[in-house]
Image: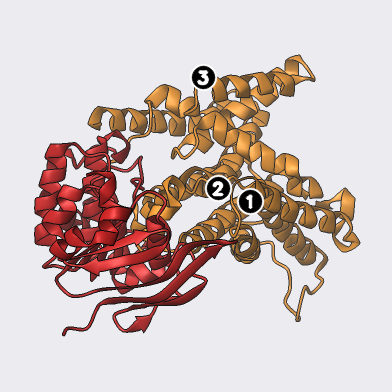
Chain colours: A orange, B red
Amino acid sequence: MQTQLRRETLVNAGLAVLLLAAPVLAVIANEPFYITLATRMAILALAAVGLNFILGLGGLVSFGHAAFFGIGGYAAGILATHAFNQEPLLFGLSGTNQMLAIWLVALVASALVALLIGLVSLRTAGVYFIMITLAFAQMIYYFAISWPAYGGEDGLSIYVRNAFPGVNTLDPMSFFLICYVLLMLFLGVFAVLRDSRFGAALQAARQNPVRLAAVGVDPFRIRLAAFVISGMITGLAGALFADLNRFVSPSMLSWHMSGELIVLIILGGTGRLFGPVAGAMLYIVFEYFLGGITERWQFFLGLILLAVVLFARGGLIGLLAGKVRHD
Amino acid sequence: MTEPLLDISNLCKNFGALKATDNVSLDLRPGEIHALIGPNGAGKSTLIHQIAGTLQPSSGSIRFLGQDIGGLSMPERTQLGLGRTFQISSLALEFSALRNVMLALQARQGTSFRFFKPVMRDSSLTEPAHEILKRVGLDQRAGLPAGELSHGERRQLEIAIALALGSKAFLLDEPMAGMDQEGSKALTRFLDTLRHEAPILLVEHDMDAVFALADRISVLVYGRIIATGTVEQIRRDPEVRRAYLGEEA
């Protein structure tokens, strides 16, 4: 068990270094586009860390996490637009172009929406849970499309990337580092929560909810708290994604996005700490390089996904570091 | 006479026309083992489910520690001190035996909403969990995932979890089921000591164990209790012999 733990730690450290090394090499080679690619990896990984919390640890397949990703994105877009146009937002409050304030709004908005969705969807399980989370996300998607004030179907541009105190966010490498640090921070949060009493209850709710109820803990409350935390992390990633593209559109809210996040986790390793990181790196490498060879790269991604599900159920992390062992 | 801890009166449960529980009254007094026996399909499990809170009775009342618990959920009943084991082991199979017991301990303390301290480095969980595993004779297997334990060991772990909950009454649903003779004997000896901690409502098919342990026995046939009494009374009861023990004679 000790050696096996160490092996996963090594794999995780390797992935962390690799993700950091990629943009550094890109700077040296003067290929800024690769920095953007690495930033995408970090942001999608962060979004998937959020989903991994409820899906991996809690065993609940949320097919609606695009809702939180999009809400985070729109929080960034709407606040920035109001700040740029110097129009007051609500109750005389103004918009802002400060990332810290935007993140806070993204976290709070995602938490509130996750609480509402969770209160309803967590009464169900299995396929019903998948369908209800999907339905909620699609509702928000269509709402965004039909809301002309913020671009509707065309989306919303962020003219200047939002600011962070003491950092020039327009420099791609600086913005990458912001995303990378946040990713590492929330990986730490994930690890701490997983090993805590709350994490124990959440994982027990996945393994055997009847057992958890029989020891006197209501699985619903544990899952609801986990769902809210999960949505918040994905929402934060959405705010970063909007800033990366300097654009937010309803596509961030669509079910494709929810599916993509699930695919990332399965590729990387469900419930594994660095599963989302491995998954996001693989996914974007496939998207970019396979996408360069053929337009039908998603067909090949499908084949790879099939192979993972059939032959490597622990995903890339499982392949490299072996099965999960609890203490 | 001492107040009963658990007092079930006139309990009925109908599934359509079938009376699975038919006007059952039953109580559990401090320090006793009250065995519930009956042929297959007599409605023992249905009764246990209603007491534990996984099934709603059609009518009648269940009082525990003087409180009507009919409207409480299973987690709430557990928190009140009603500890149950399952007929078919119900464990967190990926977690080690130790962590299964630790989960019960944190539930008992009501601390499942703590987000920081790693459980495996929390001696207020690990130490008592080891103690309890030692009591049921599982300490050598503490680190093994519950899914890799033998059938008998899983039964022992079920008991360990009930112990960890610090229950005021135990509801043991066929704890000996599928155990070998050696295991049954060891568990019988253990339950004999457990009654001093909290009384036990014991559903069991193993008649040797029931006759060795029970202070009182109730016999359930077709959802009805046809007799309640001491071991001797039940052995002699002609109706019980006809309905139940007769099958073995």
Which x, y percent locates residue B163? 21, 60
From the viewer's side, name the closer residue of A293 and A34: A293
For the point 59% across and 64% down, the residue is A104
Badge 3 is on which residue? A311
Callouts 3 and 2 in the same chain: yes
Calculate the distance from the C-alpha at mark 3 to the C-alpha at mark 2: 22 Å
Q: Chain of mark 3?
A: A
Q: Earlier along the polypeptide chain: callout 1 or callout 3?
A: 1
Q: Could you tell me the amino acid type at mark 2? A: Leu
Q: Secondary structure at mark 1?
A: helix
Mark 2 to mark 1 CA distance (whole Å)? 8 Å
Chain letter for mark 2: A
Circle 2/circle 1 CB separation < 8 Å: yes
Is A264 situated left or right of A58 in this image?
Answer: right
Q: Residue at x 52, y 71 (%)?
A: B58
Residue B31 pos. (x, y %): 14, 71
Q: Which mark is residue A129?
A: 1
Protein chain holding label 1: A
